[in-house]
Image (tube, rainbow, N blue to C red):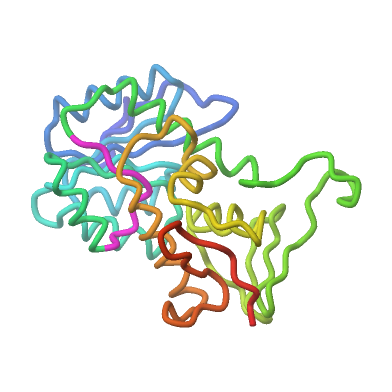
Amino acid sequence: METMDNTTVHSSGRTAAGYRALVVDDERPLAAIVASYLEQDHFEVSVAHDGTDALSAAKELDPDVVVLDLGLPGIDGVEVCRELRRFSDAYVVMLTARNNEIDTLIGLSVGADDYVTKPFSPRELVARIRAMLRRPRKVPGAVSGDSDSGAGEPPARQFGDLHIDVTGREVLLGDEPVVLTRTEFDVLAALSSRPRMAFSRRQLIEAVWGESWVGNEHLVDVHVGHLRRKLGDDPASPRYVSTVRGVGYRMGTGR
């Protein structure tokens, strides 16, 4: 174990996957328990106990996932998450003390990928993190073995000026790159995989978060809202992500 300023780094040796996790919670015993479970699952874990140290650690360590408590002293979890999104595409799991806080957080669009209410099972938390980290290795909705896709790679998808490279995980709007978080890209990839299909929130949850995911399905609305803003899409007259009343969402034509 090494200590950098006020951030504790637990090193159990890098694995083949090389995943790094940052645990941020001012409840030191809880942070230690979460870190211990992640270490047992072969993560390289760092721990911070306030928002300032968390942001410094995230900039230095470039974690793959951040487990972030909402009720931090000083800079709270909402502001930490918003600041984190300025320089990192790490998955963020927000820890909250009450179920009703999740609706508030979703309404604030803080940019977290998942929300977990205390008390929780550390084993289940690690399982959810593992499920998230598996997502970049496959494109939601992509069909393998397509004879028209060359060496097994799905072709780029185009909707008007919007180009989606599912293999390179890149998005262009005209000639300009669009910077998306991993979850935002996965939602877009799922929608664009079957452009004529109206996806329910549950179907998008299963495509992006996995069938075993349990939580507030309105999390989908948050990520769709982020997508629309980044694509310059008007929710009243969307070109790229359309709302299907009473169902969910469908990919637009781009026109």
For the point 32% across and 42% down, the residue is 93
Query: Measured along the vertical axis of the image, is residue 91 above or below residue 33?
Result: below
Q: Please provide percent x and percent y for residue 185.
A: 55, 57
Query: Which of the 4 image quadrants contains residue 104?
Result: bottom left
- Position of 56 compared to 63: left or right? left
Q: Nearer the viewer, residue 232 or 74?
A: 232
Magenta-colored span = 109-117
Magenta segment: does it hold 189?
A: no
Against 67, residue 244 (above or below) is below
Quadrant of the snapshot with the N terminus: top left
Q: Decide if residue 177 is on the left or right side of residue 8.
A: right
Queried whether the magenta region covers residue 115, the answer comes back as yes
Residue situated in front as seen by the camera: 171 or 43: 171
Marker count (numbered)? 0
Horizontal placement of 127 versus 105: left or right?
right
Residue shown at 39% from the left, 17% from the top: 40
Q: Residue 47's spot in the image, x, y percent?
A: 27, 36
Q: Which residue is drawn at the image coordinates 39% and 36% (left, top)?
A: 21
- Residue at left offset 72%, top offset 70%: 158
Image coordinates of residue 52 in percent, x first then y, are 20, 54
Q: Nearer the viewer, residue 96 or 79?
A: 96
Image quarter where the C terminus lies is bottom right
Q: Position of residue 85 (x, y in %)?
A: 37, 61
Q: Quadrant of residue 111?
A: bottom left
Is residue 50 toward the left or the right of residue 115 in the image?
A: left
Residue at the far left in the pictured view: 73
Q: Residue 214, relative to residue 111: is it above or below?
A: above
